[in-house]
Amino acid sequence: MSSFRLNPLPGFCVKSKALQDTVVPIFINIAWDSNVPPPPPASEDAIQKAMLGELNNAWFVPVIVSDLRDDKDKAGQPSLVIDCVFNTAIKSRTLKDPDFKAFIIELSLQRVEAHTSLLLSRQVGTPNIASKGKPQSRQVLVPGPLFPPGQPHHKSDTKTNLIQELDPPADASSPPRIKTILKSAPNSHTPTWTWFMAQSKICIVINVPNVTHAHIPNSTLDVEPRKVILHIPPLYDLVVDLDASNARSGSNHGIHSKGAIELKSLRDLDVDGANAEWRVAEKVIVLLV
C-alpha cells in the first residue's frame, strides 16, 4: 500500500439528485491529481470497448472518491458535494472528447453510488463552474500495483497480505475448509457489501467502519474464481461464495447482499487481475476483480 496526500485541482462540476430525495441537489466535482493511479496502457480499441461497457475488456480508470459534505446552492438552499479525483493523464481527452467525458461522468456517478448507497439521477447538469467549493485535500491509501513501474508510488506489494492468490487445493474433489479460517475470530461480524461494474471490472465494496491501521497487517483478502474471503481479526469475516445456493449460504457468506444473485450469474472473478484498496476516510475496502 502507498499512503500519500491528494491535493486535487478542479476540473468541472456535475449536478445530479438522489432518486430517494429529489429536493437536495448533489454536486460532483470532477478533479485531477497526478498522485491518483493512471489507467493502464491500452489500445484505442480497448478504450472504446471499455467506453461501451464490454465486460471482457480489461481497461479501467481508477478514481478516488471523497466523503459527502454539506454545502448550499446558489439560491442558499442545502446541497451535498462530493469529489471524484482522476489522474491528470486523462484530463485532456476528457475535455476534448465528448464521448469520453460522458464516460467519465457515468463512471463518477457509479462510484458515488457505490460509496454513498444513493441512487443518482442520470438527468445531470453541468454548471458553469470548475467545482462546487474547493476539492478537499486528504490522505489516501492505494495499492502500489495500481501505479505503473517507474512512478514513486509503485510497489510490488509483496510485503502485504491484503490480496492473496489462493493455491489450488491438493484434492480438488474436497470442499474448501472455510470453517477453519473463521474459527479464529468467534466474535467477528459479517460486514455488509455491494457491487457494481466499473467498465470491465467487477467492483466489490465492503463496509469496514471499525478497521484501523493496526488491523491491516494481520488481515487477508483471498480471491478465487468463484469466491472472496475477507478475514480481519478480530472484527470481520466474510465469505462471498458464488457457487453457494441461497438456501445453504450461512450468515457469514453474505450472499444475500444487494445484487448478489446477479453477481453469481455474471462471470468468474479475475484472480490474476485482482486489486484491493482500503479507503481510510470512506471506511470501505474496494476490490476490483
Image (spheres, grey):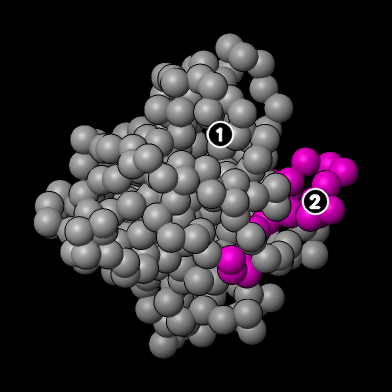
| Residue beneath the point at 46% across and 34% down | 104
Above or below, 185 relative to 149: below
* Residue 131 coordinates in the image, percent (x, y): 44, 51
Locate residue 193 relative to residue 51 in the image: left or right: left
Residue 60 is marked as 1
* Residue 95 coordinates in the image, percent (x, y): 53, 28
Judging from the image, what secondary structure is the residue with disc 2 in?
Answer: loop
Judged from this view, the residue extending furthest toward the top is 45
| Residue beneath the point at 21% across and 35% down | 123
For the N terminus, the image quarter is: bottom right
Amino acid at dot 1:
Phe
Q: Are marks 2 and 1 in contact (CB under 8 Å)?
A: no
Amino acid at dot 2:
His
Segment tinted magenta in the rendering:
137-155
Mark 2 neighbour density, 10 Å: few (under 14) some (14–19) many (20 or more) = some
Mark 1 neighbour density, 10 Å: few (under 14) some (14–19) many (20 or more) = many
In the foreground, 24 or 149: 24
Residue 154 is marked as 2
